Image (cartoon, helix red, strand yellow):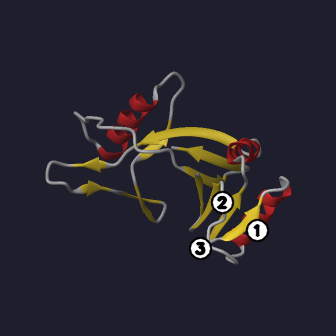
């Protein structure tokens, strides 16, 4: 399953329908526009595109957007408190764009250090990729 966050809504790609979502059985790429229309118009807060071969659908979907890679992390102190940052009017986890030649791990540490003024960070484990779509002169999908 793939999850893409778009504003306050969620677009999922899976191998089956979801009873909690507006479901779209994938037949053609025009359905990507249909899903964003549903999410943008607030007709649905969760849209699920499903197909037997969802990896092929996902690959087609990614071709429509400029793809940016980013890294960051969930930061927890010794008292088990979690760190969030307030950015663009929303609470978020520290993250940012990867620089050329950086590994995901190097980028995550650099971004957290820069955004939070922290040092001596320790990576525990990879969690999962997240995807966000936003508009900046063109639609961009950011994989973090």
The residue that mark 2 highlights is 16
Label 2 crowding class (10 Å Cα cut-off): few <14, some 14-19, many 20+?
A: some
Alpha carbon distance from label 3 to label 1: 18 Å
> Could you tell me which residue is drawn at 34 percent across and 49 percent down?
74
Q: In the rendering, which numbered label is found on residue 13?
A: none
The residue that mark 1 highlights is 37
Figure quadrant of residue 51: bottom right
Residue farthest toward the bottom in the current orientation of the protein:
43
Label 3: which secondary element: loop
Q: Is residue 126 left or right of residue 64?
A: left
Alpha carbon distance from label 2 to label 1: 21 Å
Alpha carbon distance from label 2 to label 3: 12 Å
> Could you tell me which residue is drawn at 56 percent across and 37 percent down?
69
Label 3 crowding class (10 Å Cα cut-off): few <14, some 14-19, many 20+?
A: few
- What x and y, as percent, mark residue 126? 39, 39
Residue farthest toward the top in the current orientation of the protein:
101
Label 1 crowding class (10 Å Cα cut-off): few <14, some 14-19, many 20+?
A: few
Q: Earlier in the sequence, mark 2 or mark 1?
A: 2
User: Which-is-in-front pick, marks 2 and 1?
Assistant: 2
Label 2: which secondary element: loop
User: Which-is-in-front pick, marks 2 and 3?
Assistant: 2
Give 68 or 27, whichever is nearer the viewer: 27
> Could you tell me which residue is drawn at 72 percent across and 75 percent down?
41
- What x and y, as percent, mark residue 13? 65, 55
The residue that mark 3 highlights is 20
User: Which-is-in-front pick, marks 3 and 1?
Assistant: 3
Give 17 or 97, whichever is nearer the viewer: 17
Give 131 or 24, whichever is nearer the viewer: 24
């Amino acid at each position: 399953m793939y999850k893409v966050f778009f504003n306050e809504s969620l677009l999922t790609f899976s191998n089956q329908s979801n009873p909690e979502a507006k479901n779209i059985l994938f037949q053609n790429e025009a359905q990507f526009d249909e899903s964003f229309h549903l999410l943008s118009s607030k007709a649905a807060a969760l849209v699920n595109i499903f197909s037997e071969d969802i990896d092929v659908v996902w690959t087609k979907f990614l071709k429509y957007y400029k793809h940016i890679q980013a890294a960051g992390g969930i930061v927890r102190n010794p008292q088990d408190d979690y760190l969030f940052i307030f950015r663009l009017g929303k609470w978020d986890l520290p993250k940012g764009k990867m620089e050329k030649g950086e590994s995901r791990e190097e980028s995550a540490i650099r971004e957290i250090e820069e955004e939070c003024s922290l040092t001596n960070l320790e990576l525990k484990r990879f969690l999962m990729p997240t995807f966000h779509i936003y508009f900046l002169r063109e639609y961009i999908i950011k994989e973090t």
